[in-house]
Amino acid sequence: MLKQNLARICLMTMLLFFPTACKKQLGQDELQGAALYRTHCSACHDDAPEGLLKTPPRLEGIFRHPNLPDGVPATDEAVRSVILQGLRTMPAFDGRLQEQEVQSIIAYLHSKN
């Protein structure tokens, strides 16, 4: 009986902590991208304000799909282009973000897959 209880406790402990241990740690570039995303992107893409003409797409898992919501292939260059040039009601960030910051946001988006 004691062995069975210990085995159950061991199994429960592994189930609780295994997903955390396997979760990929974010690198410096991804951490910077996460901060930039929170500053520039999440207000619309995670918590869209009411009254927008169109609800912005959620970006979690954006690179899991073959295409972006506008139908363009989901590539780093396509996402970079949307960030810098804007799209429909999304403002352009060209001149507001440096190239390395854009790359950090893209790295962060890859980590959200």
Image (spheres, helix red, strand yellow):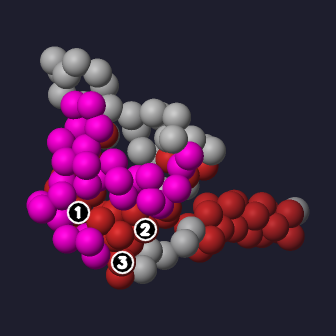
Cα distance in 3D space between marks 1 and 2: 11 Å
Residue 52 left/right relative to 8: left
Amino acid identity at mark 2: Ala
- Asked if the stretch drawn in magenta spans residue 86, the answer is yes
Assign a secondary structure to mark 2: helix
Which residue is identified by label 2?
Answer: 107
Residue in front for this viewpoint, 78 or 110: 78
The residue positioned 31% from the left and 25% from the top of the image is 55
The residue positioned 52% from the left and 34% from the top of the image is 71
Which quadrant is home to the C terminus? bottom right
Cα distance in 3D space between marks 2 and 3: 7 Å
Q: Does 52 sit above or below residue 75?
A: above
Q: Does 21 sit above or below residue 91?
A: below
Q: Magenta span covers which residues? A: 73-101
Is label 2 in contact with label 3 (beta carbons under 8 Å)? yes
Assign a secondary structure to mark 1: helix
Numbered tag placed on residue 29 in the rendering: 3
Expressed as whole percent of the image width and height from the top left, the position of residue 94 reads 18, 58
Cα distance in 3D space between marks 3 and 1: 11 Å
Q: Does 29 sit above or below residue 37?
A: below
Give the mark nearer the N terminus: 1 vs 2. Answer: 1
Numbered tag placed on residue 59 in the rendering: none
